[in-house]
Amino acid sequence: MLEGFVIPFTAPDFHVPDDVATYPRLVYRRACERPEWRCFGTREYLGDPAETRGDYEWYSYTDVVKLATELYHGLLALGLRRGDLVGLMSPNRTEWAIVDLACGALGVITVPLYDTQTSEDMAFAANNAEIIAIFLTADRLSKWFDASSACPSVKNVVLLDDRYDDRCFLHGAWSLVPNAARPLPTSVSIIPRPFEYFDAQDRKDGIADPRPLTKEEKRASEGTRMRYPLRAVCTPVDDTGLFSYLPDRMVKHTLGENYSSLAEPLSLVTHTFHILCEMGRESKAFADVDFKKYRSLHYKLGEKALPLYDIETTTPDTLLSLVYTSGTTGKPKGVQITHRNAMWTSASMQTHRVLNGTKQEFMISFLPNAHIYQRVLQGVMWRVAGATGFWQGDVKYLLSDVQALRPTCFIVVPRILNRLFEGITGKVEALSRLKRSLFFAALASRKASLQAGKPWSWWTKFFFKETKNLVGGRVRECVSGSAPLSQKVGEFLRIACDMQVFEGWGMTETAAHGVVQPVDTNQWGSVGHTLDSSTQIKLVSVPEMEYFTTDLPNPRGEIWIRGPSIFSGYYKDPESTKEVLVEGGWFRTGDIGLYNVERKELQLIDRMRGIFKLSQGEFICTATIEDAMLQSRFVDHVYMYGDRLQSYVLGVAVPSFSAVRTELGIDDTVTDMELVLRRDVIALVTKDVAQACRSKQLRTFEIPKALILEGDPWTPENGMLTPAMKVKRLVLQQKYRTYLDELYHRLNKLGNQRLSPEEAADIVLKVLDDGPKSDAGSQMTGLSGLSGMGN
């Protein structure tokens, strides 16, 4: 085994107590300690139109444990047992987390399926895991229907129906569900409560932090309720202690009321979430429950009369989940994550990085639960008895959801922060000269304070109140991961939004654990250091890429990591497991790191995958070049193309259409397809991408000499991206190769002539107009954009 260089991080000893060593135990413990604190929230439904939402309404920790217990016994009634596997395909929402809890307690292994996966990838994961049931939302049912015929092991299809729009939709569609085990419920045991209820509880507990009242609310006798007079609620059912299944006001679903078009997909459905909960309440475990007292605190958790999901059956070493990777090549691999793996990440991050306040913590859940990262962050919230508010599932409303929730911690990816930065700076540029000058004076003052480690000057708060309120007004810490964050963006948002911004690194195979920057960092671009002494990282030389642990002043090499969070292997794939899990418990990540000796932090600088040699003998890394290209504000997605017989590289880019239109003053009368065929647009993007590459100190032959622009955005749905939003290199190669080869041919005719961006654009347009000489059957024309290529 290669020895390598073990990075001398200094981190504290750490352990996870046994009574909170699994997520079901942890949530039960928090419910005993903070029974009436908020746990899960969804924005209120206000009727028509469907996207109109109010404030967040909440389930308490006690509510969540009771619902998870009902579902736990419902799963038993369905015939599920320890070791069975079930799929989950849904945007983040309350039922997702409760299914995960109930299955975790039962020992049933959850298999998240990306809601943007192709039918082929979905069927592969479902069959590889041999799932016997799947939980999904109504708007994902058609996609599952397309894959279902290839998945014979799935016997039960369960629709999630805790949201009121889903209940109203199913009320009209249930007659088209011939295989349903039973009718829809007429009642439920627990409903979410409005924020006013929990604000009153907060005042009793001395932790009140209510949202500011609007002027209208202050004037109105009914206070906050005047804002939303059309709240949809489920009403009490007689004297039963239960609540109506349907709300008192019907609300529209995004699927509308065209039920007949979904007749075939609906034929697969056997149960709903609340049918299973009803089956659980009908089990022997609930025989002595008085539902008139069920929701009150007369029934305390742990009392004999109140059933509880099993917290002892599963242990830290029980398999929690199979999380399928979405690699850019080959079939997905099922990463086996145990309760110990996931809990270690949650506990370590909470202990060493969460700024515990004196009031309840709030987090918005919008990064996909299909990634292990969001799930371990949910564990962080449970560790601090925090509240998780779920977004609506549409990026158009994300900022609205953030402002309604007012999170205290904001977990994001750089793309979100980059767009926040662009939005703020765009508004600043539109200010008058005087106001703009004052803003930048306040910015300079805070920058000086940041560098000196001093508090902000009191007068600067008047200039940043609005920018701080863009993310709700009380975010204290913002964690960014998955890609590098630029110094410019990190520093600006640290100042303008008055929140700590820091980065981290982890992988699916490490249960998202790895390294994290200090909370108070003012240097962005590195990913920090380990959080606990049980996690070790070393660098191993990669001679073929000329990275050596003996490099001075900073050692470089492939990152290897070991510790309690490391996965146990790929499901049914021992060969792939042997390639990455090696002697000594080390996991070979494939990432190239640099240990910054001065700052004592790890930096990601390269990746081992995607390496090849150009004709002049120089190795290049596609990931490094594409990461640099993505620093251009005029691109959303990029694909670098190289050939071992050529001495330089080319590229394809999906532009950031809004940024290009703003820069060149192009209005919406010009379509995206027309935009990508304009000389000025191609030249602008080519020039800016080259500048971004040079700023990352790429060598001349690593900077794309010419770019083709794509007018049809790449998405997981059209097969260009993986569910994790990474480019599918082989698919893109097949789609664009003939045009890129023709572009090489025409550029090579010019010899070593140096081209301006405009000259490169002319050649690109000529290739697109004429088409590749070797591909007479291509469907693309010079006026159709790239969407017809390689279909």
Image: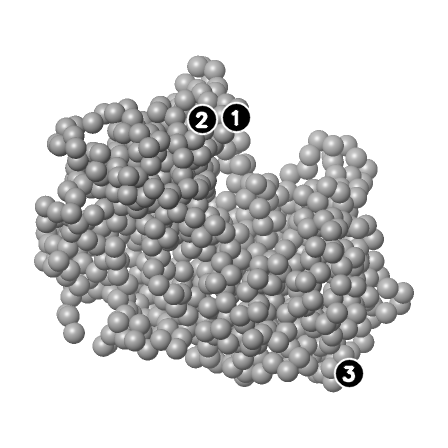
Q: In this image, 376 relative to 578: left or right? A: right
Give the residue type at disc 1.
Asp
In the rendered picture of this protein, how many numbered marks are placed on residues? 3
Badge 2 vs badge 3, beta-carbon distance below 8 Å: no
Q: CA distance from mark 2 to mark 3?
A: 65 Å
Tell me the number on the disc at residue 661. Answer: 2
Badge 2 vs badge 1, beta-carbon distance below 8 Å: yes
User: Label 1: few (<14), some or many (≥20) within 10 Å?
Assistant: few
Of callouts 2 and 3, which one flags the residue occurring earlier in the amino acid sequence?
Answer: 3
Q: In this image, 777 relative to 295: left or right? A: left
Tell me the number on the disc at residue 287. Answer: 3
Asked if residue 627 shows in the view, the reply is no
Which residue is labeled 1 in the image?
Answer: 668
Identify whether 698 is placed above or below 239: above
Q: Nearer the viewer, residue 639 or 375?
A: 639
Q: CA distance from mark 1 to mark 3?
A: 64 Å
At mark 1, the secondary structure is: loop
**Residue 781, position as x, y percentages in the image:** 40, 35
At mark 2, the secondary structure is: helix
User: Label 2: few (<14), some or many (≥20) within 10 Å?
Assistant: some
Q: CA distance from mark 2 to mark 1?
A: 8 Å
Badge 1 vs badge 3, beta-carbon distance below 8 Å: no
